[in-house]
Image (tube, helix red, strand yellow):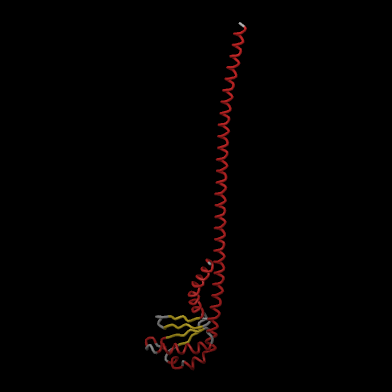
Amino acid sequence: MDIQVQELIDKIRKDGIDSASQEAAGIKSDASAEAKRILDSARKEAADMVEAAKRDAERSEKAGIAALEQAARNLVLVFRDEVQALLDKIVAREVNSAYDGDVLKKALPELISAWGKKGAASGADSLDVLLGDATLGQLRSFFEDKLASELKSGLEMKPDSGVSSGFRIANRDGSAYYDFSGESVASMLCAYLNPRLAEIMSSAAKG
C-alpha cells in the first residue's frame, strides 16, 4: 500500500514537473516571439524615423539651395538694373554733351539741304525745325545766315521747351515727324544697349 502511494506521489510530481516545464517552455517561446516582434517593430520604427529624418534633411537642403539660388538671381537682377540705370545716365549725358553748338551748326544745314533736294513736296519750305529755347537763342543768328534761302522759302525754326538738346524736324502738314533730340537718341541707344547688357550680366551670372 505504501508503495502504491509513493508511486502515485511520484507520478503526480512527475506530471506536475512535466506540465510546469511545458508551460514554462510555452511562456518562454511566447516571450521570445513577443520580444522579437517588439524588437522588429522598434527597428522598423527607428529605420522609418531615420528615413524621415533623411528626407527632411534633403528637403531642407534643397530648400536652402533654392533660396540661395533665388537670392543670387535677385542680386544679379538688382545689380543689372543699377548698371542699366547708370548706363542710361551715361548715354544720356554723353549724347547731350555731343549735341553741342558745333555739331548742330554742321548737321542741321546739311540735313535741311538734303531734304530740299528731295523735291518741292518734301523740301525745306514744308518743314519746321524745333530746337530747345536756349539752343535756338544761342544759334539763331548763325542759322538765319546759314539757312537764309531756306528760311525765305518757308522753313521755320521754332523753340520747343521739350527739347533739352538736339532737334526735331516736322513736316508742316503733319505727315512726318523726326525726333533727333538728345532724349530720343539716348533712348534708342539704351534700347539697343540694354538687351546686350542683360546678356552680358546673364552670362556672367552663369559663369
Position in image of residue 82 (x %, y %): 57, 70
Q: Vertical placement of 55 versus 38: above or below?
A: below
**Nearer-the-camera pick, 17 or 205:** 17
Q: Residue at x 57, y 54 (%)?
A: 61
Query: How many numbered marks are there?
Result: 0
Position in image of residue 166 (x %, y %): 50, 83
**Nearer-the-camera pick, 123 or 100:** 100
**The N terminus: image quadrant:** top right
* Residue 169 position by quadrant: bottom left
Q: Vertical placement of 117 versus 50: above or below?
A: below
Task: Give the residue at the far front of this rendering.
Answer: 3
**Nearer-the-camera pick, 141 or 46:** 46
Q: Is residue 173 left or right of residue 9?
A: left
Position in image of residue 196 (x %, y %): 49, 73
Position in image of residue 23 (x %, y %): 57, 23
* Residue 31 position by quadrant: top right
Q: Residue at x 49, y 79 (%)?
A: 185
Q: Vertical placement of 176 versus 68: above or below?
A: below
